Amino acid sequence: MVECFFQKIKWFRRIATRYDKLDASYLAFVYLAAIAILLFYDKTPDFSNKV
């Protein structure tokens, strides 16, 4: 699961190439990318609506 997360986080070019010079701004974008992955790229099926 962790390996898959790091693979997905590499989709963000800004993180993979380290455009930010300051550690704080780099870490902030890592947080934003993690939130985006959790919200938009999570493809787990939802079986809560079973009838």
Image (spheres, helix red, strand yellow):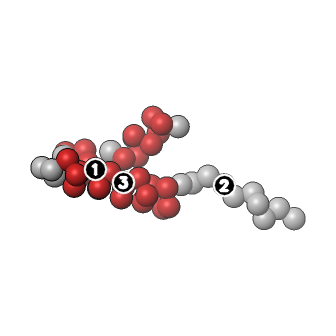
Residue farthest toward the left in the current orientation of the protein = 21
Pinpoint residue 18: horizontal percent, then vertical percent. Answer: 18, 46
Amino acid carrying mark 3 in the image: Tyr
Front in this rendered view, residue 44 or 39: 39
Pointer 1 residue: 27
Q: Quick one: label 1 or label 2, which is nearer the N terminus? A: 1
Question: What whole-number distance in Å separates the C-alpha atoms at marks 1 and 2?
Answer: 30 Å
Badge 1 amino acid? Leu
Quarter holding residue 33 = bottom left
- Residue at position x 87%, y 65% in the image: 51
The residue positioned farthest toward the right in the image shown: 51
Q: Residues within 10 Å of mark 3 (few under 14, many from 20)?
A: few
| Image coordinates for residue 27, horizontal then vertical, percent | 28, 50
**Residue for badge 3:** 31
What residue is pinned by disc 2?
Answer: 45
From this viewpoint, is residue 19 visible? no
Q: CA distance from mark 3 to mark 1?
A: 6 Å
